[in-house]
Image (spheres, rainbow, N blue to C red):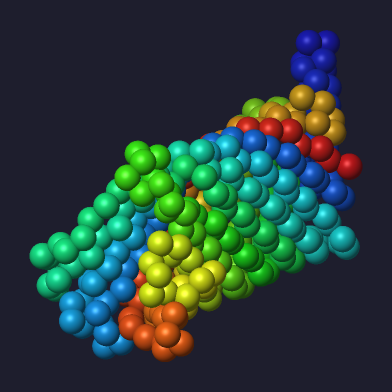
C-alpha cells in the first residue's frame, strides 16, 4: 500500500509538472542558426502572348546555400489570443547560375548557354500575425495564425574563371502577402515535445535586375518582373526542456514557392520599353537549424 501511495504521489507530481510545462508562457523567444539551400528559376517568353518562342530566356540558380540566423517571438497578449513574429536571414556562400536562351519552343535550339558563380548575396524574411489558441493541454496544443509576410532574395551573377572579369549582375526579388499558419505541439516524454507548423502564403512577386554588361540596357534597373503566386512552408523540430524557462531545439523544414504568368518589362538605353511574358518564377529548398528558447 505504501508503494502504491508513493507511486500515485509521483504520478500526480509528474502530471502537474508536465501540465505546467505545456501551458504557453506569456512570452516565448527563440534564437537559432543553421543551414539553408534552395533552387530558384524564372523564364520569359518571346512576346507578351507567351509565344515566339514560349521559353525565350531562362535563369536557374542552383544549390544556393549558406548559414542562417533566425529569431522568433510569441506573445500571449490576452486569454487565448496570441501574437507571432519571426525574422530570418541567409548568408549565401555557395551556388551556381545558368543563363540560357532558346530559338524555338519548349527549350529547343539553344542559342546561348553559360554557367556563372552565384556564391554571394542573401535572402531574408519577416512575418507577423495574430492567432487564437484552440487547444493547449498537457499533451497537445494547436494555434492557427493569420498575418502578413515579406520574403526577399538578393542574388548575383559573376565569374571567377576570368572569362568575364567585369560581370557583376544582380537580381533582387520580393514575395509579399498575407499568410495563414498553423502550429501544433505534442509531448513525447516528460521534457521532450515535437513542434510542427505549416504556412500558406498568397503573394505578389516583384523583382528588378541590373544586367551590368549589356550596354543596350539601362542601369541600375535593366528590367522588372511582376506576377502573383503562392508559397508553402512546412517545418518540424524537437524541443527539450533543460530548465523551467530554457529549452534547446533542433529541426528542419521545406519550402516551395511559385508564381503564375506575369510581365517582364525591359528598359532600353534608348529610352524605349519592351514588354513580354514572365512565364513563372519558382523557388524551393530546405533548411536545418538548432538553437535556444526562453519562456517568461
Q: How many marks?
A: 0
Residue at 23% in and 72% down: 55
55 sits to left or right of 36: left
Q: Is residue 16 left or right of residue 147?
A: right
Nearer to the camera, 82 or 54: 54
Q: Do we see residue 63 in this rendering?
A: no
Percent coordinates x, y for residue 140 in the rendering: 66, 46
Which residue is at 87% across, 60% downward? 77
Quarter occupied by residue 94: top left
Closer-to-camera residue (221/3)? 221
The location of residue 196, given as percent across then percent down, is: 58, 47
| Viewer-closest of 206 and 157 | 157
Task: Give the answer, above or below, for where 141 lies relative to 22.
Answer: below
Left/right placement of residue 181 relative to residue 226 reads right
Whether 275 is drawn above or below 95: the answer is below
Residue positioned 82% across, 18% down in the render: 5
| Rendered image quadrant of residue 272 | bottom left
Residue 220 lies left or right of residue 280; in this view the side is right
Residue 141: percent from left, percent from top: 68, 50
- Image quadrant holding the N terminus, namely top right
Q: What residue is drawn where x is 31% and y is 73%?
A: 44
| x then y, percent, for residue 42 | 36, 65
The C terminus lies in which quarter of the figure? Answer: top right
Can the viewer see residue 129? yes
Q: Is residue 238 above or below residue 265?
A: above
Amino acid at each position: 500500500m505504501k508503494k502504491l501511495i508513493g507511486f500515485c504521489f509521483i504520478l500526480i507530481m509528474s502530471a502537474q509538472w508536465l501540465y505546467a510545462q505545456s501551458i504557453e508562457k506569456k512570452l516565448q523567444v527563440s534564437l537559432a542558426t543553421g543551414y539553408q539551400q534552395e533552387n530558384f528559376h524564372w523564364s520569359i517568353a518571346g512576346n507578351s502572348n507567351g509565344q515566339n518562342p514560349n521559353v525565350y530566356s531562362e535563369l536557374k540558380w542552383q544549390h544556393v546555400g549558406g548559414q542562417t540566423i533566425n529569431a522568433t517571438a510569441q506573445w500571449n497578449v490576452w486569454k487565448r489570443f496570441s501574437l507571432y513574429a519571426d525574422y530570418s536571414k541567409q548568408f549565401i556562400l555557395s551556388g551556381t547560375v545558368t543563363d540560357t536562351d532558346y530559338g524555338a519552343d519548349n527549350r529547343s535550339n539553344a542559342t546561348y548557354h553559360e554557367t556563372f558563380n552565384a556564391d554571394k548575396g542573401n535572402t531574408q524574411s519577416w512575418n507577423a500575425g495574430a492567432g487564437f489558441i484552440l487547444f493547449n493541454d498537457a499533451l497537445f496544443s494547436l494555434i492557427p495564425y493569420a498575418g502578413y509576410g515579406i520574403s526577399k532574395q538578393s542574388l548575383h551573377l559573376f565569374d571567377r574563371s576570368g572569362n568575364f572579369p567585369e560581370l557583376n549582375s544582380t537580381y533582387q526579388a520580393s514575395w509579399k502577402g498575407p499568410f495563414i499558419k498553423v502550429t501544433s505541439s505534442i509531448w513525447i516524454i516528460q521534457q521532450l515535445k515535437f513542434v510542427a507548423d505549416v504556412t500558406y502564403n498568397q503573394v505578389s512577386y516583384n523583382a528588378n535586375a541590373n544586367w551590368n554588361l549589356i550596354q543596350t540596357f539601362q542601369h541600375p534597373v535593366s528590367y522588372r518582373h511582376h506576377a502573383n503566386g503562392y508559397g508553402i512552408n512546412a517545418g518540424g523540430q524537437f524541443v527539450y526542456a533543460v530548465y523551467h524557462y530554457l529549452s534547446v531545439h533542433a529541426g528542419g523544414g521545406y519550402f516551395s514557392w511559385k508564381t503564375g504568368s506575369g510581365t517582364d518589362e525591359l528598359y532600353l538605353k534608348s529610352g524605349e520599353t519592351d514588354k513580354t511574358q514572365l512565364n513563372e518564377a519558382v523557388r524551393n529548398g530546405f533548411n536545418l537549424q538548432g538553437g535556444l528558447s526562453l519562456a517568461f
